[in-house]
Image (cartoon, helix red, strand yellow):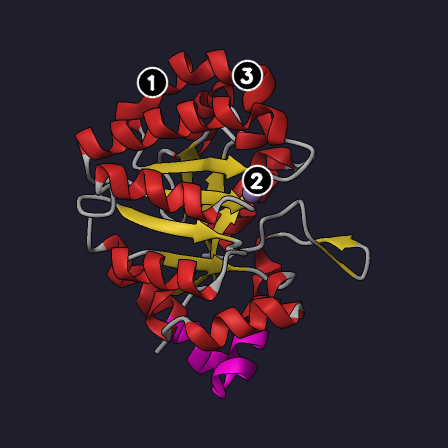
Amino acid sequence: MYASLIDYHCHLDLYPDFEQLVNKCEHDQIHTITVTTTPRAWPKNYELTKNLTYVRPALGLHPQLVAQHSHEIQIWDEYFPQAKYIGEVGLDASPAFYKSFQKQILIFDHIIKQCKKSGGKIITIHSVRSAQHVLNIMDKYDVARENMVVLHWFSGSLSEAKRALDMGCYFSVNSSMLSTARGRQLLTYIPTNRVLTETDGPFIKNHNKVLSPENVSLCVESLAEIWNLTCAEARVKVFENMTTLENSV
Ligand code: MN
Protein backbone atom coordinates (compact mmCIF):
# COMPACT_ATOMS: atom_id res chain seq x y z
CA MET A 1 0.00 0.00 0.00
CA TYR A 2 1.21 3.48 -0.85
CA ALA A 3 0.89 5.99 1.97
CA SER A 4 1.82 9.63 1.63
CA LEU A 5 3.72 11.47 4.35
CA ILE A 6 1.73 13.47 6.89
CA ASP A 7 2.75 16.73 8.51
CA TYR A 8 -0.25 17.48 10.67
CA HIS A 9 1.13 20.68 12.24
CA CYS A 10 3.41 22.98 10.28
CA HIS A 11 3.62 26.78 9.98
CA LEU A 12 4.17 27.01 6.24
CA ASP A 13 3.52 30.77 6.26
CA LEU A 14 6.49 31.37 8.55
CA TYR A 15 9.01 30.07 5.98
CA PRO A 16 10.61 32.65 3.66
CA ASP A 17 9.47 30.67 0.60
CA PHE A 18 5.89 30.13 1.80
CA GLU A 19 4.16 29.95 -1.59
CA GLN A 20 6.77 27.68 -3.16
CA LEU A 21 6.62 25.40 -0.16
CA VAL A 22 2.83 25.10 -0.41
CA ASN A 23 3.21 24.04 -4.03
CA LYS A 24 6.05 21.67 -3.21
CA CYS A 25 3.99 19.90 -0.52
CA GLU A 26 1.10 19.56 -2.95
CA HIS A 27 3.38 18.30 -5.72
CA ASP A 28 5.11 15.81 -3.38
CA GLN A 29 1.71 14.69 -2.03
CA ILE A 30 2.55 15.44 1.59
CA HIS A 31 -0.62 15.86 3.64
CA THR A 32 0.16 19.14 5.41
CA ILE A 33 -1.94 21.11 7.84
CA THR A 34 -0.66 24.64 7.65
CA VAL A 35 -1.51 26.19 11.00
CA THR A 36 -1.69 29.94 11.51
CA THR A 37 -0.66 31.91 14.59
CA THR A 38 -2.99 34.86 13.93
CA PRO A 39 -6.33 34.94 12.11
CA ARG A 40 -4.93 37.80 10.00
CA ALA A 41 -2.95 35.11 8.16
CA TRP A 42 -6.09 33.16 7.26
CA PRO A 43 -7.15 34.81 3.94
CA LYS A 44 -3.76 34.25 2.28
CA ASN A 45 -3.50 30.64 3.54
CA TYR A 46 -7.07 29.96 2.44
CA GLU A 47 -6.58 31.45 -1.04
CA LEU A 48 -3.33 29.60 -1.69
CA THR A 49 -4.74 26.22 -0.66
CA LYS A 50 -8.42 26.29 -1.60
CA ASN A 51 -7.95 24.25 -4.79
CA LEU A 52 -5.34 21.89 -3.36
CA THR A 53 -5.75 18.31 -2.19
CA TYR A 54 -2.85 17.80 0.21
CA VAL A 55 -2.32 21.17 1.88
CA ARG A 56 -5.10 22.34 4.17
CA PRO A 57 -5.16 25.59 6.19
CA ALA A 58 -6.01 25.89 9.89
CA LEU A 59 -7.41 29.00 11.57
CA GLY A 60 -5.49 29.90 14.70
CA LEU A 61 -4.73 32.35 17.44
CA HIS A 62 -1.57 31.12 19.13
CA PRO A 63 -1.56 31.28 22.95
CA GLN A 64 1.91 32.85 22.87
CA LEU A 65 0.43 35.80 20.93
CA VAL A 66 -2.63 36.30 23.10
CA ALA A 67 -0.92 38.89 25.33
CA GLN A 68 -0.68 41.33 22.37
CA HIS A 69 -3.30 39.99 19.96
CA SER A 70 -6.34 38.94 22.01
CA HIS A 71 -8.54 41.50 20.19
CA GLU A 72 -8.00 39.48 17.00
CA ILE A 73 -10.48 36.94 18.33
CA GLN A 74 -13.08 39.04 16.47
CA ILE A 75 -11.28 38.32 13.21
CA TRP A 76 -11.01 34.67 14.20
CA ASP A 77 -14.80 34.58 14.71
CA GLU A 78 -15.36 36.11 11.31
CA TYR A 79 -13.39 33.39 9.47
CA PHE A 80 -14.49 30.51 11.68
CA PRO A 81 -17.34 29.26 9.41
CA GLN A 82 -14.84 28.97 6.51
CA ALA A 83 -12.38 26.78 8.42
CA LYS A 84 -12.53 23.02 8.80
CA TYR A 85 -9.20 22.91 10.67
CA ILE A 86 -8.64 25.04 13.77
CA GLY A 87 -5.15 25.83 15.09
CA GLU A 88 -2.81 26.70 16.39
CA VAL A 89 -4.82 27.33 19.53
CA GLY A 90 -4.40 26.35 23.17
CA LEU A 91 -2.64 27.41 26.33
CA ASP A 92 0.96 28.08 27.34
CA ALA A 93 1.85 28.41 31.03
CA SER A 94 5.62 28.54 30.56
CA PRO A 95 7.35 31.47 32.35
CA ALA A 96 7.59 33.69 29.26
CA PHE A 97 3.83 33.55 28.66
CA TYR A 98 2.38 32.98 32.11
CA LYS A 99 1.51 36.67 32.50
CA SER A 100 -1.21 36.32 29.89
CA PHE A 101 -2.47 32.95 31.13
CA GLN A 102 -5.85 34.22 32.38
CA LYS A 103 -6.40 36.00 29.07
CA GLN A 104 -5.35 32.83 27.21
CA ILE A 105 -7.96 30.87 29.16
CA LEU A 106 -10.71 33.31 28.13
CA ILE A 107 -9.68 33.09 24.46
CA PHE A 108 -9.29 29.30 24.44
CA ASP A 109 -12.60 28.85 26.26
CA HIS A 110 -14.29 30.98 23.59
CA ILE A 111 -12.64 29.02 20.75
CA ILE A 112 -13.66 25.66 22.21
CA LYS A 113 -17.19 26.93 22.84
CA GLN A 114 -17.47 27.96 19.17
CA CYS A 115 -16.19 24.55 18.04
CA LYS A 116 -18.74 22.85 20.26
CA LYS A 117 -21.55 24.92 18.76
CA SER A 118 -20.53 24.20 15.18
CA GLY A 119 -19.10 20.68 15.36
CA GLY A 120 -17.25 19.06 12.46
CA LYS A 121 -13.88 20.75 13.12
CA ILE A 122 -10.42 19.23 13.48
CA ILE A 123 -8.55 21.15 16.19
CA THR A 124 -4.75 21.17 16.70
CA ILE A 125 -3.95 22.21 20.26
CA HIS A 126 -0.85 23.53 22.06
CA SER A 127 -0.73 22.66 25.79
CA VAL A 128 2.68 23.61 27.18
CA ARG A 129 2.67 23.22 30.98
CA SER A 130 -1.12 23.42 30.83
CA ALA A 131 -2.47 20.02 29.77
CA GLN A 132 -4.78 19.91 32.76
CA HIS A 133 -6.33 23.31 31.98
CA VAL A 134 -6.67 22.41 28.30
CA LEU A 135 -8.42 19.14 29.16
CA ASN A 136 -10.69 20.87 31.68
CA ILE A 137 -11.93 23.32 29.04
CA MET A 138 -12.39 20.53 26.50
CA ASP A 139 -14.33 18.59 29.11
CA LYS A 140 -16.48 21.60 30.05
CA TYR A 141 -17.85 21.71 26.48
CA ASP A 142 -17.49 17.99 25.68
CA VAL A 143 -15.87 19.37 22.52
CA ALA A 144 -14.43 16.06 21.33
CA ARG A 145 -17.90 14.62 20.85
CA GLU A 146 -18.67 16.44 17.58
CA ASN A 147 -15.11 17.51 16.72
CA MET A 148 -11.76 15.77 16.47
CA VAL A 149 -8.94 16.98 18.69
CA VAL A 150 -5.23 16.55 18.03
CA LEU A 151 -2.86 17.39 20.86
CA HIS A 152 0.28 18.76 19.25
CA TRP A 153 3.72 18.23 20.89
CA PHE A 154 2.03 16.92 24.05
CA SER A 155 4.24 17.14 27.13
CA GLY A 156 1.76 16.39 29.91
CA SER A 157 1.82 13.45 32.30
CA LEU A 158 0.74 9.92 31.46
CA SER A 159 -2.43 10.37 33.52
CA GLU A 160 -3.24 13.49 31.49
CA ALA A 161 -2.53 11.50 28.33
CA LYS A 162 -4.96 8.84 29.56
CA ARG A 163 -7.62 11.47 30.13
CA ALA A 164 -7.07 12.80 26.60
CA LEU A 165 -7.24 9.30 25.11
CA ASP A 166 -10.51 8.66 26.94
CA MET A 167 -11.90 11.81 25.29
CA GLY A 168 -10.87 10.45 21.89
CA CYS A 169 -7.89 12.73 21.26
CA TYR A 170 -5.10 12.03 18.79
CA PHE A 171 -1.48 13.06 19.35
CA SER A 172 0.72 14.62 16.67
CA VAL A 173 4.34 13.92 17.51
CA ASN A 174 7.58 15.32 16.09
CA SER A 175 11.21 14.31 15.86
CA SER A 176 12.26 16.67 18.64
CA MET A 177 9.80 15.03 21.06
CA LEU A 178 10.96 11.58 20.05
CA SER A 179 14.56 12.44 20.83
CA THR A 180 13.72 12.80 24.55
CA ALA A 181 13.15 9.98 27.06
CA ARG A 182 9.89 11.59 28.14
CA GLY A 183 8.58 11.81 24.58
CA ARG A 184 9.52 8.20 23.87
CA GLN A 185 7.87 7.07 27.08
CA LEU A 186 4.65 8.79 25.98
CA LEU A 187 4.84 6.91 22.69
CA THR A 188 5.07 3.56 24.42
CA TYR A 189 1.91 4.53 26.32
CA ILE A 190 -0.34 5.92 23.55
CA PRO A 191 -2.02 3.29 21.35
CA THR A 192 -0.48 3.30 17.86
CA ASN A 193 -3.85 4.12 16.30
CA ARG A 194 -3.94 7.56 17.96
CA VAL A 195 -0.62 8.82 16.62
CA LEU A 196 -0.01 11.34 13.82
CA THR A 197 3.23 12.95 12.66
CA GLU A 198 4.21 16.63 12.45
CA THR A 199 7.31 18.79 11.99
CA ASP A 200 6.09 21.95 13.79
CA GLY A 201 8.35 23.67 11.27
CA PRO A 202 10.00 26.09 11.17
CA PHE A 203 10.49 25.78 14.92
CA ILE A 204 12.40 22.51 14.84
CA LYS A 205 15.90 21.97 13.50
CA ASN A 206 17.92 18.88 12.73
CA HIS A 207 21.72 19.38 12.57
CA ASN A 208 21.12 23.16 12.44
CA LYS A 209 18.83 22.91 9.44
CA VAL A 210 15.19 23.98 9.81
CA LEU A 211 12.85 21.06 9.16
CA SER A 212 10.30 21.31 6.38
CA PRO A 213 7.36 18.95 5.76
CA GLU A 214 9.34 16.39 3.72
CA ASN A 215 11.57 15.90 6.79
CA VAL A 216 8.60 14.43 8.66
CA SER A 217 10.20 11.20 7.45
CA LEU A 218 12.63 11.57 10.40
CA CYS A 219 9.69 11.30 12.73
CA VAL A 220 8.37 8.25 10.88
CA GLU A 221 11.82 6.61 11.29
CA SER A 222 11.71 7.17 15.06
CA LEU A 223 8.18 5.84 15.28
CA ALA A 224 9.15 2.75 13.30
CA GLU A 225 11.93 2.08 15.78
CA ILE A 226 9.65 2.56 18.81
CA TRP A 227 6.88 0.46 17.29
CA ASN A 228 9.24 -2.19 16.00
CA LEU A 229 7.95 -1.79 12.44
CA THR A 230 9.62 -0.97 9.14
CA CYS A 231 9.48 2.68 8.05
CA ALA A 232 7.02 1.74 5.31
CA GLU A 233 4.75 0.02 7.84
CA ALA A 234 4.91 2.97 10.25
CA ARG A 235 4.06 5.32 7.40
CA VAL A 236 1.01 3.25 6.46
CA LYS A 237 -0.06 3.16 10.13
CA VAL A 238 0.04 6.96 10.43
CA PHE A 239 -1.79 7.33 7.12
CA GLU A 240 -4.55 4.99 8.31
CA ASN A 241 -4.82 6.97 11.54
CA MET A 242 -5.27 10.22 9.63
CA THR A 243 -7.88 8.62 7.39
CA THR A 244 -9.83 7.34 10.40
CA LEU A 245 -9.64 10.74 12.09
CA GLU A 246 -10.75 12.66 9.01
CA ASN A 247 -13.62 10.25 8.37
CA SER A 248 -14.86 10.82 11.93
CA VAL A 249 -15.98 14.42 11.43
MN1 MN B 1 3.27 25.15 16.35
Query: From what the image shows, is residue 60 above or below residue 138?
Result: above
Badge 2 amino acid: Leu
* Residue beneath disc 2: 12
Q: At 49% from the left edge and 25% from the top edge, which residue is drawn?
A: 102
- In front: 38, or 21? 38
Q: At 58% from the left edge and 38% from the top edge, which residue is drawn?
A: 93
Residue 11 drawn at (x, y percent): 56, 40
Q: In terms of sequence position, does the residue under pointer 1 or pointer 3 come before the other? A: 3
Q: Quadrant of the N terminus?
A: bottom left
State if disc 1 and disc 2 touch (CB < 8 Å).
no
User: Which label sits on residue 77?
Assistant: 1
What is the span of residues highlighted in magenta in the rendered image?
221-237
Badge 3 amino acid: His
Q: Quadrant of residue 170?
A: bottom left
Q: In terms of sequence position, does the residue under pointer 2 or pointer 3 come before the other? A: 2
Q: Mark 2 near ligand 1 (CB under 8 Å)?
A: no
Q: At 37% from the left edge and 66% from the top edge, which residue is drawn?
A: 239
* Residue beneath disc 3: 69
Pick out the residue farthest to the right.
208
Per the image, label 2 sits on a secondary structure element best described as helix
State if disc 3 and disc 1 touch (CB < 8 Å).
no
Q: Residues within 10 Å of mark 1 (few under 14, many from 20)?
A: some
Considering the whole magenta stretch, tell me its main secondary structure: helix
Query: From what the image shows, is residue 163 above or below residue 125?
Result: below
Please give left or right for residue 134 compared with residue 95 in the image: left
Q: Residues within 10 Å of mark 3 (few under 14, many from 20)?
A: some
Q: In terms of sequence position, does the residue under pointer 2 or pointer 1 come before the other? A: 2
Residue 80 drawn at (x, y percent): 31, 24
In three-dimensional space, the C-alpha distance between marks 1 and 3, rounded to whole angstroms, equals: 14 Å
Residue 135 drawn at (x, y percent): 36, 46
